[in-house]
Image (cartoon, grey):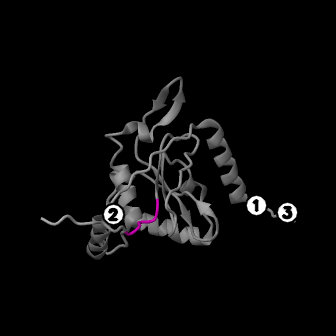
Amino acid sequence: GLLSLSRNQRKIASVVAESHRDIPAAFTAVRVDVTEALSIARELTRRLRVLVGLTELVVKATADLLDAFPIFFATPAGNGRALRATGAHVGVTLDRGKGMYVPVVRDADRRTLAEIARDLMRLRTIAGNGVFREQDLRGGNIMVTLHVDGVVLAVPIIFPGQICALSLSTPLPEVREESGG
């Protein structure tokens, strides 16, 4: 028989269809060693007394690119132009078993890592309930997607009204041959 999609699933399907129709598909995959970043995150968790993980570090690092790469955060304005963003409003994909949501960490470029970490914890809690306020989900100008264990590569969906998205797979262990001196 037929299955009914939830309101949230129907909205996601609509956005994905619009994105595929209007935004050219292009992506680059790059390998990044996050060993040191994870070690720094553990130390910052102890020092700041708030959970800091790869998500928090990536949101802050992405937001801090606003001045160097303003086009990544801009809004398409037609005729080969884009409207400059006044702040880095970073959408972060969250799925806690009640559907995928993309709440927005506002003004992440002007906030401390601890503030971003607290905001993400609040948003994760809301995602577990599946009851976001509309203002939690609107106004992102760049999106960061982080994936669950086992995902090696995912091509991000760029939301209509945005120009750029960053997608990270699960950190994977890698065997490397060390050269002897």
- Kind of residue at disc 3: Leu
Separation of marks 2 and 3 at Cα, in angstroms: 43 Å
Residue 5 disc label: 1
The extreme right residue here reads 1
Question: Which mark sits nearer the N-terminus, 2 or 3?
Answer: 3
Q: Which picture quadrant has residue 105?
A: bottom left
Q: Residue at x 69, y 48 (%)?
A: 14
- Tell me the SS state at disc 3: loop
What is the x, y in percent for residue 17?
68, 45
For the residue marked with disc 2, what is the amino acid?
Val
Report which residue position mark 2 lands on.
34
The residue that mark 3 highlights is 2
Q: Residue at x 69, y 58 (%)?
A: 9
Residue stretch rendered in magenta on the structure: 169-173
Q: Going by the image, does 42 lie left or right of 20?
A: left
147 falls in the magenta region: no
N-terminal-most mark, 2 or 1: 1
